[in-house]
Image: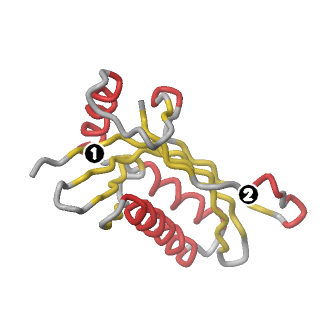
Amino acid sequence: MAVTTYPLVFSFRDVFVGNGFVAHVAASGRVILTDEGDGDIWMFGVQPGGVAGGGRERSQAFYEFKKNYRSVLFDIAIESSTYEALESAISSFYSEINHTHLEMWTEAVQAVRAGKLSLPDLRSENADLFPSKIEIRRLDCRDASCNDNSFDEIRKAA
């Protein structure tokens, strides 16, 4: 069975409660979506590279990927005794790049741009204008804002 690999980008915003602090984490990253051809759909992190999630449907793979991403950050929050330790550990986790997946992602982006690969039901995003990045900010209740609320997004990289 042929495996089809699609390049995706994501944008997640979350609030994590640590030991005596609250942090807002805004992440933009890259993943590959693989359709195994046998009914299994998987998302594998490019950056951050240490996360994956899968299922029988694409929505289930998205859900499992996000759940596993959050699970890593929950574990970091539990293990961090200070905000500075949390910030350092999250930055370290996020800087991990899976180079095998990066190569697959780059090839898939080229295939999308050449018109050889399509995922028409997802909005496209120019991959060159959507770098992987993470922003971590300590929240003080006085600084809390409804502007920190947002929906997670998954888009096709083009």
The label shown at residue 71 is none
Of tags 2 and 1, which is closer to the observer? 2
Residue with the mark numbered 2: 149
Callout 1: few (<14), some (14-19), or many (20+) C-alpha neighbours within 10 Å?
Answer: many
Q: Is residue 115 above or below residue 131?
A: above
Q: In the displayed structure, does residue 56 sit left or right of residue 88?
A: left
**Front one among 11 and 86:** 11
Q: In the displayed structure, does residue 18 sit left or right of residue 41?
A: right
What residue is drawn where x is 25% and y is 39%?
A: 104
The spot of residue 3 in percent (x, y) is 17, 48
Give the position of the C terminus as an image quadrant.
top left
Callout 2: few (<14), some (14-19), or many (20+) C-alpha neighbours within 10 Å?
Answer: few
Q: Amino acid at mark 1?
A: His
The spot of residue 44 in percent (x, y) is 32, 54
**Front one among 140 and 122:** 122
What residue is drawn where x is 55% and y is 58%?
A: 88
Q: Amino acid at mark 2?
A: Asn
Rendering colour mode: secondary structure
Q: Is residue 135 above or below residue 110?
A: below
Q: In the displayed structure, does residue 82 sit left or right of residue 118?
A: right
Instruction: Name, please, the residue furthest toward the left.
Output: 1
Mark found first going from the N terminus, 2 or 1: 1
The spot of residue 45 in percent (x, y) is 36, 52
Contact? badges 2 and 1 (CB < 8 Å): no
The label shown at residue 101 is 1
Which element carries disc 1, helix, strand or loop?
helix
What residue is drawn where x is 52% and y is 70%?
A: 76
Which element carries disc 2, helix, strand or loop?
loop
Q: Is residue 45 above or below residue 40?
A: above
Instruction: Name, please, the residue furthest toward the right.
Output: 142
What residue is drawn where x is 42% and y is 52%?
A: 48
The spot of residue 57 in percent (x, y) is 35, 63
